[in-house]
Image (cartoon, rainbow, N blue to C red):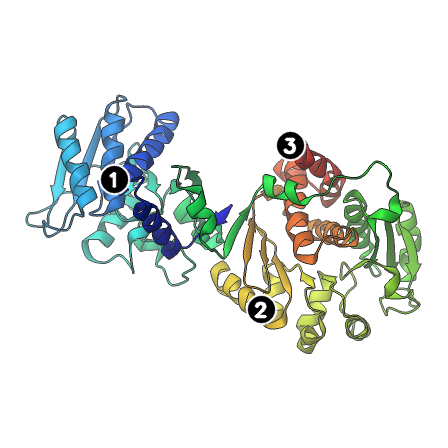
Amino acid sequence: MKIFNTEDIRIINRKILEIGNETSLELINRTAQGVASEIIARWNPGRPLIVFAGPGNNGATAIAVARILFGHGFRPAVYLLNIGGDKLNSNCRNSREALRSETPEVAFTEVTGNGKFSLPNMTPATLIIDGLFGSGLKGQLTGGFMLLVRAINDSGATIVSIDVPSGLSGDLCADGIDRNTIHADLTLAVQFPRPAFFMKENQALIGEWKTLDIGLDPEVIRSTPNRYHFTEASEIKSLLRARKPFSSKADYGSALLIAGSYGMMGAAVLAARGALRAGVGKLTVHAPQCGYEILQSAVPEAMFEADTDKNKLVIGNMKSLKDFSAIGIGCGIGTHEITENALEQFLQSTSRPVVLDADALNCIARRPTLINNVPALSVLTPHAKEFDRIFGDQPTDEARLLKAIEVAHKYDILILLKGRYTTLVRCDRMVYFNSTGCPAMATPGSGDVLTGVITALMAQGYKPEISALIGAYIHGLAGEIAQETQGEYGVTAGDIAANIGVAIKNILR
């Protein structure tokens, strides 16, 4: 699914209106119908309902919602904020007049600022529709609007925001003030989610979010360029290749995982299991000698290649890298100085893209010049702390994503930022938010499984950026499947690895 920033959405709306098949008021009314339908499905008409409407299209939508809900037994009290008395746009005026003429029984108050405005009684039992500004706001809320938003938040009421919580920029903008932004329980976004929805620090402001398909012209959407994407099942299915009847393991690549050290062989095991479940034809694990019995017992399907050192990785005694169609390195290798040296020699010895995770990233953080040796289009899979160790501390997810866009382009690499919406940042500055995953995956070793999956996909001939995109989706779906049987608390990385094949089957089905 395409994701657009605020300016892109304005361009889309303008193109649609220029075509002339629809008016902006028709789009507003369709949005209002979608919002009203969602509210009717979730809440009882007997609940106290207050609608706050601003002077623009967001306010016009909120007023239209009130009119629809009144016809379904709700009894809304509508407050239209028209400070100065002449600030309404034409759509908001039309929506106001329709409310007055078609449903005069609705309690309606227009606040112009000429007299004292007494806030309505708002309690935790109240349902509030936030139609103050949405994505139409430029800059921060100030004055009376800021005080109103604070009072709404302090009331403890259930809040439904139309499009975007008022006060929040839908774009990546790290300078907002939470107190001055609506804290929605449900955000109903028009047609598309916004980039800000995928940032951890905005979760408390957005709450649950859902998109409302109002039938915008698909050709206009297709022809409008965008930077952000939300990866869904249909896209992944179109990328995955079904296997041919007359195929053998030789058709599905040969992967090498350089992983493990004394006390950390579990990471190598998990990465290997992830790679095998993701369908790699042949798998070799290069690890210190101490891992021989562990790997051969835990993952008998994988071949073991012993390093020259017993306990730590020095990358000695290795087959030619040309024997492998993809290589992943880092899971459990440790950060000994000798291992750092070995990683540097490895990176200097290959020009092909590789997958770097865990301790490979920690070694780069300890020796920053290593980043210059990472081959182009390699996939780095850091979580937030690993990313910050390499590229500097970032105060928020938004700042971290903006930094990732910068460094991915600078070093010509792919960065897969792991998190709630694991995010692929490509070197061409394109950003893909993954739609799968769950809290149960916050468990040791989960990232090792992901490394194995991505390496296996690259070995099977998928391009690095496609491997990272598909791998993140499959990994997240496997976690969701594991959660169904083990619950949020009980999922282990081994459960995720065990369900990688099931996840692929479900996607292809």
* Tag of residue 484: 3
Q: Are marks 3 and 2 in contact (CB under 8 Å)?
A: no
What secondary structure is found at the residue carrying circle 2? helix
> Amino acid under label 3?
Glu
Q: Nearer the viewer, residue 451 or 146?
A: 451
Instruction: Compute the Cα span from label 3 to label 2.
Output: 39 Å
Q: Is residue 297 above or below residue 353?
A: above
In the image, what residue type sits under mark 1? Leu
Element under disc 3? helix
Q: Which badge, 3 or 2, is on the more N-terminal residue?
A: 2
Nearer to me, 120 or 462:
462
Q: Nearer the viewer, mark 3 or mark 2?
A: 2
Q: Is residue 149 visible?
A: yes
Residue that numbered label 1 is attached to: 25
Name which quarter of the figure residue 53 lies in.
top left
Q: Position of residue 254 (x, y in %)?
A: 85, 54
Residue that carries the numbered disc 2 in the rendered image: 409
The quadrant of the rendering that contains the C terminus is: top right
Q: Judge whether residue 119 can be spotted in this image.
A: no
Instruction: Measure the alpha-carbon separation of dots 2 and 1.
Output: 42 Å
Q: Say few, some or many: other residues with alpha carbon within 10 Å of mark 1 (under 14 / 14 to 19 / 20 or more).
A: some
